[in-house]
Each structure stands twice: as structure tokens, then as C-alpha cells.
Image (cartoon, rainbow, N blue to C red):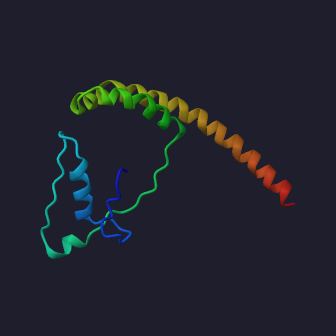
Amino acid sequence: MGSNPDSDGSGKISAQEAFNYSDSIHDPYDTPVYNQSSASAGNCYLGQRYLVWWWWCRIILEHLEPVYMRRSTPEFYEIMHEKLVPQLEKLEIALNKDSEQMRKKMETSVKEIIAKVYK
């Protein structure tokens, strides 16, 4: 991120701080909206989620980002959802099968190494 959205330094990002940040960097095709319907609505914060990217996600991102930069946002997502995602889903199925075999082999090897080291 170019800046820290936690403007009050509380260690949490409030809905208002998230709105302010997104409004400062938003794409013209996507304008953020903030509205508070009660006094307690201002006391909500964004939750932190842990995300694991499979190794192949970075490959996709590396090759997809230049294409994204050359097209309008609506055109990019229309093509992505209609043409790219179906092909990537097929590739993902094959990769998951191969990855599962590799995971099982790795698990066996790790188990054997740990058993030897801690005998």
C-alpha cells in the first residue's frame, strides 16, 4: 500500500478509515460509499484474514497484470470471467491432483526425517 489507512494509529482500520483510504485511491469505475445508520456503526473495524496463495497464483498475477493495465476495468473483467476463468479452472484441477501426490510424498519424507532426528 502506498499509505497506511490506519490514520489514528490504533492498530485497527475502522470503516471510516477504510472508506477514506479507498476514496483516495479509487478507480473511476468503482466509487466507494460510506454511510452510518446508527451511532454504533462507526465502531466497526475490518477483520484480518490470512490468505494463502498457491504458488501458481503469483504466476497468473505476473502475466495478467500487464494485460489489466492495458484495458478498461469492465472490459478486463468481462473477458476474464467469460474466457480466462473457465480455462484456469481446468488447469487448477490438474494442478491440484499433482499437488496432492507431491504433498503425500513430502509428508512421508518429513515424517521419516523427524522420526530419525528425534529417535
Relative to residue 39, is residue 15 drawn left or right?
Answer: right
Q: Nearer the viewer, residue 96 or 28?
A: 28
Relative to residue 91, is residue 42 drawn left or right?
Answer: left
Residue shown at the point (51%, 35%) measured from the top left? 56
Which quarter of the figure is the C terminus placed in?
Answer: bottom right
Residue shown at the point (84%, 60%) measured from the top left? 118
**Residue 18: x percent and y percent?**
27, 59
Relative to residue 70, is residue 58 drawn left or right?
Answer: right
**Residue 90: x percent and y percent?**
45, 27
Residue 42, quarter of picture: bottom left
Residue shown at the point (70%, 47%) measured from the top left? 107
Q: Nearer the viewer, residue 26 or 39?
A: 26
Establish if 87 lies above or below 97. above
Establish if 77 lies above or below 43. above
Residue shown at the point (79%, 55%) measured from the top left? 114
Q: Nearer the viewer, residue 110 or 67?
A: 67
Q: Nearer the viewer, residue 8 or 62?
A: 8
